[in-house]
Image (tube, rainbow, N blue to C red):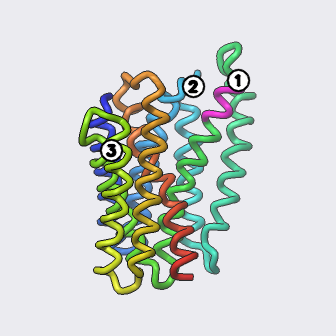
């Protein structure tokens, strides 16, 4: 999968988050669940796990538990409920290796890949935690929108350095502009979130650039939606700092 296609997938996933976040917390949770499932199917193929469907099942289950826990949690900070899911994913990854052993020499890699994939999936619940924070609903829309802008900007040219500058500048600029549109977010808060969104796209794009391009479509999809899930934590931190 080429970088342009991957960036398009990132932009589409971010748009789903923005649209469902605007509609409400439950719709956002459903949107994140779709992204989590897409990531879970492709992640084991991307990381070359020996038993991909076992890994997929653990990642889907862990991501779903994290979402439900954050969605139904009664007291702030809601993200603390995600910690239990991450711990359960790590334990499940180890148990799965015992019950369904990997190919010789691949045990550590399989456990690490499944646990890290589960952590990425669980981090998507941070979007829901942000949306549940009073006054931070618009921050979710801003964060997802700037992420989509940064993703498109990261493939505007054939030069990696120029694309990096474009992603950071345009992501930050979009955050600055939306900070003026939304009453609950100051302009400097928009800049901060836009810069964080651009950085998440740039850093993960650079990591994938150093790896062979995934041939399986699902592996490419997983590489595209990963920045969207990971950025949820950055947006949540921004919400805690800027909104409370």
Quarter that holds the N terminus = top left
Residue lying furthest left:
156
For label 1, the crowd category at 10 Å Cα-Cα, with few meaning under 14, some 14 to 19 and many 20 or more, is some
Q: Position of residue 217 (x, y in %)?
A: 34, 29
Mark 2 sits on what residue? 49
Quarter that holds the C terminus = bottom right
Kindly report the distance in space between the C-alpha atoms of the residues bearing marks 1 and 3: 35 Å
Is residue 17 shown to the viewer in this render? no
> What's the mark number on residue 154?
3
> What's the mark number on residue 42?
none
Identity of the residue drawn at 30% across and 51% down: 11
Q: Which one is in front, 64 or 104?
A: 104
Which of the marked residues, 2 or 1, is nearer the chain's N terminus?
Answer: 2
Q: Which quarter of the picture shows residue 54?
A: top right
Identity of the residue drawn at 60% across and 48% down: 119
Q: Which quarter of the picture shows residue 107?
A: top right
């Amino acid at each position: 999968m080429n970088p342009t296609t991957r960036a398009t997938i990132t932009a589409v996933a971010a748009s789903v988050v923005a649209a469902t976040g605007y509609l409400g917390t439950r719709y956002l949770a459903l949107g994140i669940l779709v992204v989590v499932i897409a990531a879970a199917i492709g992640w084991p193929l991307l990381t070359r796990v020996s038993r991909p469907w076992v890994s997929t099942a653990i990642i889907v289950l862990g991501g779903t538990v994290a979402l439900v826990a954050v969605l139904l949690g009664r007291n702030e900070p809601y993200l603390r409920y995600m910690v239990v899911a991450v711990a359960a994913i790590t334990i499940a990854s180890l148990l799965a290796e015992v019950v369904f052993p990997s190919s010789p020499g691949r045990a550590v890699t399989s456990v690490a890949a499944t646990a890290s994939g589960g952590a990425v999936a669980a981090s998507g619940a941070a979007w829901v935690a942000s949306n549940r924070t009073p006054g931070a609903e618009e921050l979710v829309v801003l964060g997802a929108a700037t992420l989509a802008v940064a993703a498109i900007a990261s493939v505007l040219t054939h030069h990696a350095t120029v694309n990096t500058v474009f992603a950071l500048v345009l992501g930050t600029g979009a955050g600055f502009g939306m900070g003026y549109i939304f009453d609950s977010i100051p302009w400097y808060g928009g800049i901060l979130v836009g810069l964080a969104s651009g950085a998440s796209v740039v850093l993960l794009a650079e990591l994938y650039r150093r790896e062979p391009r995934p041939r399986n479509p699902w592996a490419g999809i997983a590489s595209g939606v990963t920045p969207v899930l990971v950025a949820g934590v950055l947006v949540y931190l921004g919400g805690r700092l800027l909104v409370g």
